[in-house]
Amino acid sequence: MTIPMIIALAVTAFMVYLIMTEKVPFGAPPIIACALMVLFGVTDIQTAFRGFSNPSILMLASFMVIIAGLQKTSFIAAFKSAVVKMANKGGFKAYVLMLLVVMLGTSMFGTGSTAYYVMTLGLLSTIPSSKNLPGSKFLMPAGFACNHPLIPVNTALQFGYVLAVLEAGGAAMNVSLPRFAIANFILSAGFFAWCLIAYKFLPSHDIASATDEAKAAA
């Protein structure tokens, strides 16, 4: 392992630390990491900051504005109401319907929307656990469902991610949006099938009480 490789790994670890600890604003760690790469001579300034001028990145930034607007629509209020009703009802049917509603929301917001993921898990974590549908049964599948659209009509965000990564790696591949949407649908179908099977094997307990018991045992 060369010195530049070691420096690059150290800078990456430092960036992850800043993101996880939230010591600085969320957008600052990547910029700091790029600046450190240049400062230590790992790369030149044009290469380090080339991604910020990438057309795909600009497209993703504009798409974030659309997502922020969707959060203020009546759809979100209806989504919250439907999820809470199904969770309170409980049972396998409610579990399936809840996943379908979350996946439908993913279709609206697009795969990879951090805002939608945080909103959904934040909402579900406030729902009281019950014997019919304990939190340990639906929280993890619902979190994963935020990245699996029921109908892949809004995959532009994830498609932009793929193009940006490929271009940054120097790979020129002709990936069409329709083919990417079909691949997303296949992944979503496989995920949903896993959820149906996993329901019988997922633990059945209140997450909060399990956490308290673990703390007491420690």
Image (tube, rainbow, N blue to C red):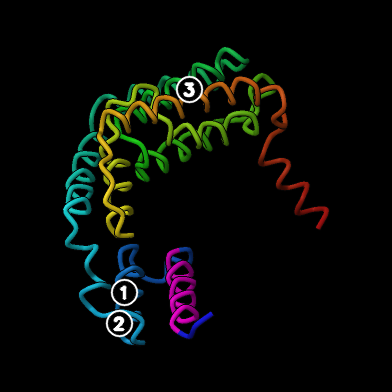
Q: Nearer the viewer, residue 197 or 186?
A: 186
Circle 3 residues within 10 Å: few <14, some 14–19, many ≥20: some
Q: Nearer the viewer, residue 175 or 56?
A: 175
Q: Are marks 2 and 1 in contact (CB under 8 Å)?
A: yes
Horizontal and vertical percent position of residue 106: 36, 30
In percent of the image, x 67 and y 39: which residue is there? 207
Identify the element where label 1 is drawn: helix
Q: Nearer the viewer, residue 207 or 31?
A: 31
State the separation of the CA atoms marked 3 and 2.
Answer: 44 Å
Q: Quadrant of the C terminus?
A: bottom right
Residue that numbered label 2 is attached to: 38
- Whether the magenta-drawn stretch holds residue 169 is answered as no
Q: Is residue 195 left or right of residue 209?
A: left
In percent of the image, x 50 and y 80: which residue is there? 6
Residue that numbered label 1 is attached to: 34
Horizontal and vertical percent position of residue 203: 72, 32
| Mark 3 or mark 1, earlier in chain | 1
